[in-house]
Amino acid sequence: MTDYGHNLLFGTFVTPNGPQAVDLAVTADRAGLDLVTFQDHPYQPAFVDTWTLMAYVAARTERIRITGNVLNLPLRPPAVLARAAASLDILSGGRIELGLGSGAFPDGVAAMGGRRLTPGQSIDALSEAIPIIRDLWNTDTRERVNHQGRYYQVVGAKRGPRPAHDIGIWIGAYKPKMLALTGRLGDGWLPSMDYLPKGADSLPEMNARIDEGAESAGRAPADIRRLLNFMRLDGGPAQLAEQFADLALNHGISGFILGGDDHELAEVLAAEVAPATRELVERERSH
């Protein structure tokens, strides 16, 4: 049994298909959900650009937190991404999180002018990028940012702007090396249930790899929030609440993000599933 003790978050996973995506985000915000997230495939011409969409959604909403799910790092240079994220966080009143991925479709990345990297190289590039992002956000010192890596070089960059809140870096990870990296460098883990090799039965082993990565870096496993995307759901609100509570209490999942691009589902998630799940988890935690 693994419960990392985080407060529970509920949100939607929205296809970035233009005005419809904005409407879905507004619904999620008005319904009282915690998160609205967008996939990021810059090589997909059927979608609008995810970062542009996030900025527009931030202006159209009032309280909901916004993130890519997950942003394609090979096509978004880390120093520029750091400043973009901090800027949008400031403008939105501290509502931006940073979901990051190493780039799962190398052909698409190469088609857009990005580097074609092997899976191992992509992991190494992500491990270089995260410290660059964190250094740009850290304005506690005036020392310039310098990183001389194999994939990214930053030479004398000025720090800032500082985000309005501590932006979480949530990493989309499935394989052992990426899970270990998540434990060492991430603030959160953001996979999809549909892609877990054995569904929920994969969670103990994958959590263990994150925990080991965290401990190897002198961090506590509870420092890393565990979130999960769901593309397919079975059961009504009461059954979903029981499923989510079990995932929270036994597998440490504290973020539940539903796909489907469905206004009614977002409203039911906020009005029925989220309160029932929180009640079940709080009752168990208080024992």
Image (cartoon, grey):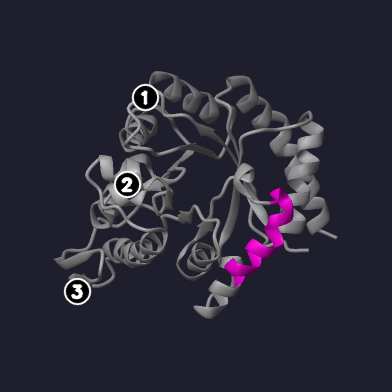
Magenta stretch containing residue 123, yes or no?
Answer: no
| Secondary structure of the residue carrying numbered label 3 | loop
Magenta segment range? Answer: 198-211
Q: Are marks 3 and 2 in contact (CB under 8 Å)?
A: no
Q: Earlier in the sequence, mark 1 or mark 2?
A: 1
Residue at the far right in the pictured view = 287
The image quadrant where one finds the N terminus is: bottom right
Residue at the spot x=80%, y=46% of the render? 280
Q: How many marks?
A: 3
The local crowd at label 3, few if under 14, some if 14 to 19, many if 20 or more residues have their Cα within 10 Å, is few
Residue on which the image places disc 2: 90
Q: CA distance from mark 1 to mark 3?
A: 43 Å
Q: Is residue 29 left or right of residue 162?
A: right
Q: Is residue 117 above or below residue 228?
A: below
Q: Nearer the viewer, residue 138 or 80?
A: 80
Residue on which the image places disc 1: 46
Q: Nearer the viewer, residue 65 or 201?
A: 201
Residue on which the image places disc 3: 143
Decide whether the magenta segment is chiefly helix, strand or loop: helix
Q: Nearer the viewer, mark 1 or mark 2?
A: 1
* Position of residue 223 measured from the top left corner of the image (x, y, whole percent): 56, 66
Residue at the spot x=77%, y=31% of the render? 237
Q: Is residue 126 above or below residue 281?
A: below
* Position of residue 129 measured from the top left corner of the image (x, y, whole percent): 32, 62
Q: CA distance from mark 1 to mark 2?
A: 30 Å
